Amino acid sequence: MKNKLYKNIKDFGLSTLAALLIISCATKQTTATNTKIAEVYPKLIFLNYTISKNEMGNKKIQFINKIQTEGKLKNVSNKYLKFGTLGDLKCSQLDKDSVEIISVIIKNPLIKQIEIISDSLIFENKIIELRNAPFSLRLQLHNKTKFIAINEIEDSLQNTLPLFITKID
């Protein structure tokens, strides 16, 4: 009877050990489904324009060219203004319904401030008003942008006058 009990315990132990070995040696595979995720790469757009002012003070913008490429801006905060003054340009990215997505403000390209040395050898600031000048925009392109509008700031309330709209393909 002892032998029979000993044999049952021995058989149970061996079968448990075998089961543990089989379970531990089994491969642990996870099944993955092949789902395709549409990757949206960030895009940059470079826009080049010329702006001119006639004798009446009316401004006109002419489009030169645009370049779109994949990429991301490193530092946006240094180049553009937070608030504009009279004559500065507000450049807005618009969606298909012409709703503003994001905008930046650039200084009036027709006004240049330079330092000169006076006759008494002292540095002085001088403001020069140009009749025409080129200017460029470098923007992080929002994926819903269909147009870029350039408006002139007319007053201290940041009301703007539309100057030019560029269609983005």
Image (cartoon, rainbow, N blue to C red):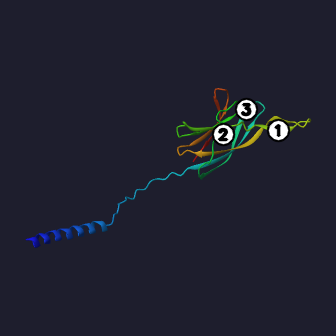
Q: Earlier in the sequence, mark 3 or mark 2?
A: 3
Q: Position of residue 17 (x, y in %)?
A: 24, 68
Q: Amino acid at mark 1?
A: Glu
Give the camera-side residue of 56 and 135: 135
Residue at left offset 10%, top offset 71%: 2
Please name which of the two marks, 3 or 1, marks the residue nearer to the observer.
Answer: 1
**Cβ atoms under marks 1 and 2 closer than 8 Å:** no
* Residue 78 percent coordinates (x, y): 66, 42
At label 3, counting other C-alpha atoms closer than 10 Å, the crowd grade (few under 14, some 14-19, many 20 or more) is few
Label located before the other in sequence (3 or 1): 3
Mark 3 is on which residue type?
Asn
- The residues tagged by marks 1 and 2 sit, at their Cα atoms, a distance apart of 22 Å
Label 1: state its secondary structure. strand
Q: Specify the label residue 80 is tagged with.
A: 2
Instruction: Check the image and name the residue furthest to the right.
Output: 119
Residue 152 falls left or right of residue 39: right
Q: Indicate the secondary structure of the residue bearing disc 2.
A: loop
In the depicted structure, whether residue 134 falls above or below residue 31:
above
Q: Residue at x 70, y 42 (%)?
A: 62
Q: Residue 79, image x and y in percent?
A: 67, 42
Q: Which residue is mark 1?
A: 115
Depth check: give the residue in front, 54 or 29.
29
The part of the image, by quadrant, that contains residue 130 is: top right
Using a 10 Å C-alpha cutoff, classify the residue at mark 1 as few (fewer than 14 neighbours), some (14 to 19) or many (20 or more). Answer: few
**What residue is disc 3 on?**
58
Mark 3 lies on a secondary structure that is: loop
* Residue 13 % position (x, y): 20, 68
| In the image, residue 52 above or below residue 13 | above
- Measure the C-alpha gap from mark 3 to mark 1: 28 Å
